[in-house]
């Protein structure tokens, strides 16, 4: 998208987010039903659900560099809303890149219009790194089936389809990725309790009981699930880092404004050296994270590998946003810990980001493996 059209799009989206969606999400609490039914039509009409879908399928075809400010702005507004959009856009983006012509034709146009959505199922109650997956794809009596149990699946109860990572016994027990309709016989979806952060998001578990699939349902070739998983997690980590930047930006804004207006002993907090140090440290983390994001987004859009960079930027992002939200509480004080204060929500949203698209222990391994391989 050209710069002028992009600037106009961002202006429209900011108006949508802060003028129309902000009142809807203002009361979203940890036990509230998912926000999706309340916001889907507004998001679809504004083109949000097709931001990463190519123009030929009804989307905007944004680059990653162009998309990151959108997801950051959503994270500033509300973590649950951000997560709903993140999952929808991330996995339609995956299908646009590596899905078959049939899969793209069937799903991308209705996904851009808000009629369909795609989730991703990797984690299981007893595993989730990929190597320890117990969900199986088997072939017998002329039919191929999926059996297993996935949980902690974002957008599970609102999506129309899910990309499932499973051990494919007919592909040498390698991992395969398969696209399954959630209304197919043998698929059972149940909501899970709300998460600590991202209020109003959608979290569920999915059981697959003798679910019949065909060769056209595989995403990529059979036995190529590891590559599919690596692709989606790699760019997903960049999107999570962009979300962390939005949380950090909002926490800084709220803290700085409070420090300027709050007067104690005839002096604004912003004039006190201890508070100034907190704010400077927050600004430093935000600046470093934004610079890292610009670098990795530019490399991805140029078609360069970013396995190490995507893990490193997410590692830095979750540490930076934790520091920023910690300091925000120190500046604003106890009122920021009360349910209903925006900093209380931002603090919880920041912690949940730690586990999206892989915890730190996995990210360290992925990053250093890639970096060491470059030197061998």
Image: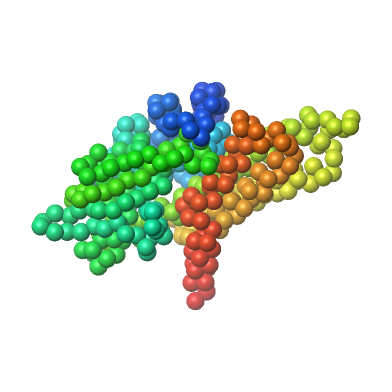
Residue 194 visible: yes
Task: Kindly identify the residue that appears in the image at 58 percent across and 51 percent down.
Answer: 318
Is 268 displayed left or right of 299 in the figure? right
Using residue 317 as the reference point, say whether residue 281 is left or right of it. Answer: right
Q: Position of residue 137 (x, y in %)?
A: 24, 57
Q: Quadrant of residue 155?
A: top left
Q: Whole-percent x and y of residue 340?
A: 61, 30
User: In this orientation, which residue lies closer to the viewer: 319 or 19?
Assistant: 319
Residue 83, compared with residue 230, is above or below; it is: above
The part of the image, by quadrant, that contains residue 38 is top left
Quarter the N terminus occupies: top left
Q: Residue at x 36, y 36 (%)?
A: 158
Identify the residue at horizontal 43%, vertical 54% (top origin): 233
Relative placement, left or right, of 171 versus 262 is left
Residue at left offset 23%, top offset 49%: 209
Residue at the left extreme of this rendering: 141
The answer to which image quadrant residue 91 occupies is top left
């Amino acid at each position: 998208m050209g710069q002028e059209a992009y600037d106009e799009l961002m202006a429209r989206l900011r108006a949508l987010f802060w003028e129309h969606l902000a009142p809807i999400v203002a009361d979203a609490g940890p036990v509230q039903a998912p926000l999706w039914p309340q916001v889907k039509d507004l998001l679809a009409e504004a083109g949000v659900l097709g931001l990463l879908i190519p123009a030929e399928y009804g989307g905007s075809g944004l680059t990653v560099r162009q998309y990151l400010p959108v997801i950051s702005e959503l994270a500033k507004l509300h973590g649950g809303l951000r997560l709903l959009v993140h999952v929808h856009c991330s996995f339609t983006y995956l299908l646009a890149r590596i899905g078959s012509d049939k899969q793209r034709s069937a799903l991308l146009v209705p996904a851009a219009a808000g009629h369909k959505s795609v989730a991703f199922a990797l984690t299981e109650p007893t595993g989730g790194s990929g190597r320890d997956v117990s969900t199986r794809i088997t072939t017998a009596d002329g039919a191929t089936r999926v059996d297993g149990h996935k949980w902690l699946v974002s957008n599970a109860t609102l999506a129309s389809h899910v990309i499932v990572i499973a051990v494919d016994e007919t592909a040498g027990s390698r991992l395969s990725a398969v696209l399954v309709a959630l209304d197919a016989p043998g698929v059972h979806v149940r909501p899970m309790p709300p998460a600590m952060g991202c209020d109003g998001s959608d979290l569920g578990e999915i059981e697959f009981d003798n679910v019949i699939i065909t060769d056209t349902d595989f995403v990529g070739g059979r036995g190529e699930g590891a590559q599919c998983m690596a692709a989606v997690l790699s760019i997903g980590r960049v999107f999570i880092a962009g979300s962390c930047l939005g949380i950090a930006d909002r926490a800084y804004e709220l803290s700085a404004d409070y420090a300027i207006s709050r007067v104690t002993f005839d002096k604004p907090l912003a004039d006190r050296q201890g508070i100034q140090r907190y704010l400077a440290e927050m600004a430093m983390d935000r600046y470093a994270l934004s610079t890292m994001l610009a670098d990795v987004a530019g490399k991805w859009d140029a078609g360069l590998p970013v396995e190490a960079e995507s893990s490193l930027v997410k590692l830095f992002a979750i540490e930076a946003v934790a520091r920023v939200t910690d300091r925000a509480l120190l500046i604003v004080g106890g009122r920021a810990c009360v349910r209903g204060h925006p900093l209380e929500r931002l603090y919880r949203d920041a912690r949940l980001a730690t586990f999206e698209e892989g915890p730190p222990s996995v990210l360290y391994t992925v990053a250093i493996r890639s970096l060491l391989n470059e030197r061998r």
